[in-house]
Amino acid sequence: MNYELTDKQKEIRRSMRNLVPEIQTVAEDNGLETLKQNMVKLAAVNYQSIVLGEDIVGYCLAAEELAKTCPSTFFSSMSTTAAFGLPINKFGTAEQKRKYLEPILSGAGWGALGVTEAQAGSDLSGMTTIAQKTPTGGFVLNGSKSFVTNAPLADAFLFLAWTNQEAGKEKGMTFFLIDRKAKGVQISEATKTMGLRGAPIADLQLIDCAVGPEAVLGKTGDGYGQWTAVEPLLWLSVSLLALGIGVSCMENSTIYAKGRTAFGKPIGYFEGVGAKLAIMFTMVDLGRMITQRAAWGMEHNDTEAAILASCAKLFTSEAVNKIADLAMQIFAGHGYILGSKVERLYRDARIAEIVYGTSEMQRGFIAADSLKKFKTA
Ligand SMILES: Cc1cc2nc3c(=O)[nH]c(=O)nc-3n(C[C@H](O)[C@H](O)[C@H](O)COP(=O)(O)OP(=O)(O)OC[C@H]3O[C@@H](n4cnc5c(N)ncnc54)[C@H](O)[C@@H]3O)c2cc1C
């Protein structure tokens, strides 16, 4: 891997660093309007285009700045760009790209991905949403999706449904693009979450939702293959969320440890606190390296790229929970108070080990790949 950033990548980082003071932290009480304003500001520095572009290391640089500044804005924008937009960018028709991607790139459009169901999270074959073909070539969809990030404001959804359950997941699943206003789309009240409270989520129901053949993404039956093709970028994106939260915990803790005094000196100079700062710094730097290494591999079609993205998600998501815990210990009582920054980061960090492939799933995936590489003794 080339560790030297290109001039373009340095420019991406510089313009994001200039922008982030204008990004407001979204919380449950200032909600959707702030999120919308943030998205327009991000579009002004082409953030959405960077996520969907080919410079994946450049995406890492921009995303780290955003995730550090406002994890909820990062997660919500990731759901629109990477989760909803990337499959369309990779597999959509020219018309689908025009209709769904153009508004996203301008910061005005919102998308959401509906894959998970009440009985199908890690194991997608437990999914029950069905798309029944009609004699005219269209489909009628019925089913429910859980935890759909951005559902309260999305203009359109990308849903995974069975088109031929007997064919199994590899050949029997299809992605459909469905507009929010389509008949038969029902969106629940926003779901309350432990962290990332500025990123709105809700459940969705499709009741006899009729769509034409133009709603299919790519070809019927290609859904699972499309999903596995975009998953590594989602893992990388969750790594970037974890990295950004980790950087924020580390920086805030270091500043606090320099200013807070006890027994006549700043607490950072006590070995017990200094050691925590050192661990945080080391974990952040390792997380950044493995994430950028995976991104570089993805850009260069490295055969290890998907595994590296999985390793990056596994490492950074577990590291950030350790880092947030250390930050809480340094801030002590002042961190534990509801509404403190560290308290929010501690809650925000937890999702990284869960969403888009739990740590257990990543371990299974990495172990299976390792076992394939070696012959038995
Ligand atoms: C805030 C939030 C936002 C989300 N946004 C979206 C979204 O926008 N779109 C979307 O489609 N989904 C979304 N999700 C869903 C998320 O991706 C799932 O929660 C995740 O994939 C895990 O699925 P599950 O919760 O059903 O857990 P389960 O799959 O039921 O897993 C439960 C436990 O069993 C373990 N387990 C399961 N199988 C195995 C195995 N083979 N080996 C070892 N352990 C195993 C898991 O690791 C976990 O610990 C979101 C979730 C949250 C909380």
Image (cartoon, helix red, strand yellow):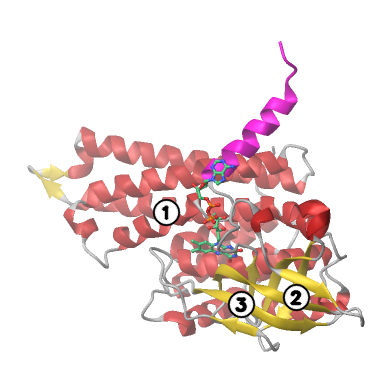
Query: Which one is closest to the eye, mark 3 or mark 2?
Result: 3
Q: Residue 278 at x, y = what percent?
A: 35, 37
Determine which residue is flagged by label 1. Answer: 350
In this view, the residue farthest toward the top is: 377
Q: In the image, is residue 225 above or below residue 192? A: above
Determine which residue is flagged by label 3. Answer: 205
Q: CA distance from mark 3 to mark 2?
A: 14 Å
| 144 and 219: which is toward the camera | 144
How many numbered markers are drawn?
3
Give neighbour class at mark 2: few <14, some 14-19, many 20+ (Cα, 10 Å): many
Q: CA distance from mark 3 to mark 1?
A: 27 Å
State which tag comes first along the sequence, 3 or 1. 3
Mark 3, secondary structure of its residue: strand
In magenta, the rendered stretch is 359-377
Of the residues shown, which amino acid type is indicated by label 3? Gln
Determine which residue is flagged by label 2. Answer: 177
Q: Quadrant of residue 281?
A: top left
Magenta-colored stretch includes residue 8: no
> Would residue 296 be found to the left or right of residue 197 on screen?
right
Mark 3 beta carbon near ligand 1 (under 8 Å)? no
Query: Which one is closest to the eye, mark 1 or mark 2?
Result: 2
State which tag comes first along the sequence, 3 or 2. 2
Magenta-colored stretch includes residue 363: yes
